[in-house]
Image (tube, rainbow, N blue to C red):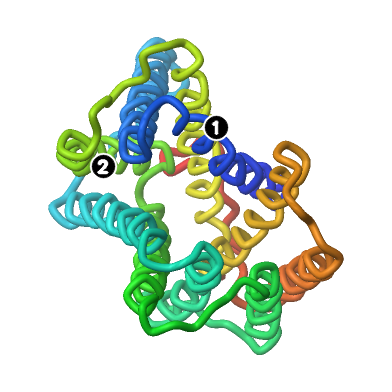
Amino acid sequence: MLLCLLLVGVFTLSIAAILIRFSEQYIGPNATVFNRFWIATAIFGVWRGSKAIASQLSRDSPAPNNTYTLSDILLLILSATVTSISHISWVWSLTQTNVANANLLHNLTPIFATFGGWLLLGHNFDKRFLIGMFLTIGGAIAIGIQDFQVANEQLIGDGLALFSAVFYAANFLVMEKLRDKFSATSILFWSCFLRVFLTFPIVFFTEKQIFPSSLEGWIPVFCLALFCQVIGSAILGYSLKQFSSGFISLFLLLEPIITTTLAWVIFGEHLSFFNLLAFVVVLFGIYIAKSGRGSEKEEAKLVPDTVGCPNE
């Protein structure tokens, strides 16, 4: 059941590229990101506020009292920081190298998440999981390998794309650590809140227009915040209670498949037989990894996560 929910989360995240393309017809990329974060913060804030009010009015379910220690605050700041660095590195890499190179190198995220989970969080991965991981990554790379180029003038951009993969993996590891104590919505609320302040100076000095000036401009930005930043990210965060960050980042490699398919349907972009074959390899790799040791956390197999508990 949770795997189906995770698939829904990946689907909502996969439409981000489509919504960003529509949004950038009205405002710039940095303004799109800034509006995405502050709208998501507002939605999470309303959600947390309504839950707090409901808990106060209910006699049967008292509100949870999670205290924030200095370590928790530092981890929340770290989560927002590494995510912002990952995004900035990704956007910057697209100006220094081609999209194919940037995508291929960014798809290496599961390797760093798996290694970090083993090194820092004590995860154990068997051969079956590792074989599935490399099959999935290989299939994802094959989707854009025909456009891959090696050139000295693109080394900086390639390095930035790889840099973004490292920090994207770091965000999964930090969030997984925070999930031991806090709910996914609490983590994402504070992370988005902090990202608003981190991105505002960038958008203020780089964009002429910060907010959309028409309803047509607000619709894609609001959908981007609601579906991608709130629903999609919340599902991923919730799934980290049971699945390891390595498997979650691996499962996210379904995103380019969905995005490519949507681009084919909506924008008429080319979809070759080789792409379809690569899609099959990705799905097969995820299936093998899921059946291996390391996809699910050991404690999650023993104690199932309860929706109504403080750490939902």
User: What residue is drawn where x is 67% and y is 74%?
Assistant: 146
CA gap, disc 2 to disc 1?
Answer: 18 Å
Tell me where residue 141 appears, x and y as whole percent: 63, 73
Q: Residues within 10 Å of mark 1 (few under 14, many from 20)?
A: many
Where residue 214 is drawn, which disc sits there?
none
Can you identify the residue that label 2 sits on? Answer: 195
For the residue labelled by badge 1, is the local secondary structure a helix, a strand or a loop? helix
Residue at image coords 53%, 82%: 124
Q: Amino acid at mark 2?
A: Arg
* Label annotation for residue 227: 1
Q: Are marks 2 and 1 in contact (CB under 8 Å)?
A: no
Q: Is residue 293 left or right of residue 268?
A: left
Of residues 142 and 149, the one nearer the viewer is: 149
What amino acid type should be assigned to the residue bearing mark 1? Phe
Marks counted in the figure total 2
Q: Quadrant of residue 310?
A: top left
Residue 5 in the image, given as x and y percentages of width and height: 67, 44
Depth order, front residue of 5/281: 281
